[in-house]
Image (tube, rainbow, N blue to C red):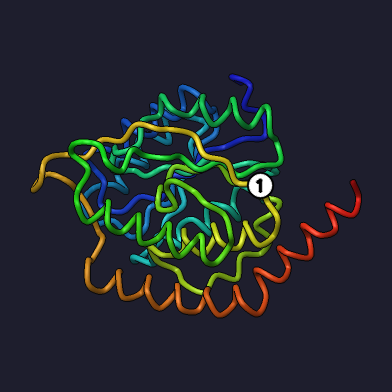
Amino acid sequence: MHGSEGICVIIPAYENAGTVVSVIKGALAYVPDVFVVDDGSTDGTATLLRDLSRQEPGLRVISHPENRGKGKSLKDGFLAAKAEGFQVAITMDADGQHFPEDIPKFLSIHSMRPDAMVMGARNISADGMPARNTFANRFSNFWFRFQTGVDLPDTQSGFRLYQLGAIGSMPLLTSRYEAELELLVFQCWKGVPILSVPIGVWYPPEGERVTHFRPFMDFARISVLNCILCVLAIVYGLPVRFLRNQARMNKR
């Protein structure tokens, strides 16, 4: 079981026929239970997943008849994992940018801090990192710090370890790409400790990378979500965090 009892991997996939099989097999080498959510793919991903599930008993496939967004895929994966009794889920992308070899780093931190959420932190200044990713991450880090009072080096990484019990019923404001930011902010407001671990990342050359990020539309959606979260931070998130910290200090 590789020291991963009660832990599963969740992989949202959309049009990732060229990489999804290798990502799944890599994850299964470290964690014996993997949930893949096929979000309405039309490129052969569904066929590959069906064939692989016959060979790998630890693989569960959840299929959306049409594209519903990454947030919806994560939510369905979380609910399926919770229904099977898993307490922890590691999420990673299906496009090959995350290295399954980094999974033991998450497991190691979890063994020491079983109450914490763990964020994979990319080196956003490394050679090969797309310029728009560097800008978007710094933008996101700034607003996350404003909304939570917590400083993280990489708030946009999809390689994460979640405490499933802390997620609750997940009434998400959004169902798409920006849902990961929403989940991160809400976990922080709930008082879940958030730790970071350095991870590797691979970006194919321009023109070869499979990405579904729509620069104008998705950036606009993230900006709207940040506005909503800033308001919620002022009226709820930061006051709750302040009261929680005061209660901890009073117990000392």
Judge by depth and name the residue closer to the eye, 83 or 46: 83
Above or below, 195 relative to 245: above
Q: Quadrant of residue 22?
A: top left
Q: Locate residue 125, reporting x and y percent.
A: 27, 41
The answer to which quarter of the image holds residue 136 is bottom left
Residue 15 percent location from the top left of the image:
25, 52
10 Å crowding of disc 1: few (<14), some (14-19), many (20+): some
User: Given the image, on which type of amino acid does mark 1 rest?
Assistant: Pro
Quadrant position of residue 149: bottom right
Would you name the residue on which mark 1 appears? Answer: 193
> Looking at the image, which is closer to me, 126 or 33?
126
The image quadrant where one finds the N terminus is: top right
Q: Give 122 or 79, whichever is nearer the viewer.
A: 122
Give how far across and how far down residue 211 sits, in percent.
22, 53
Q: Please, is residue 230 above or below residue 39 in the view?
A: below
- Residue drawn at (71%, 71%) of the image: 239
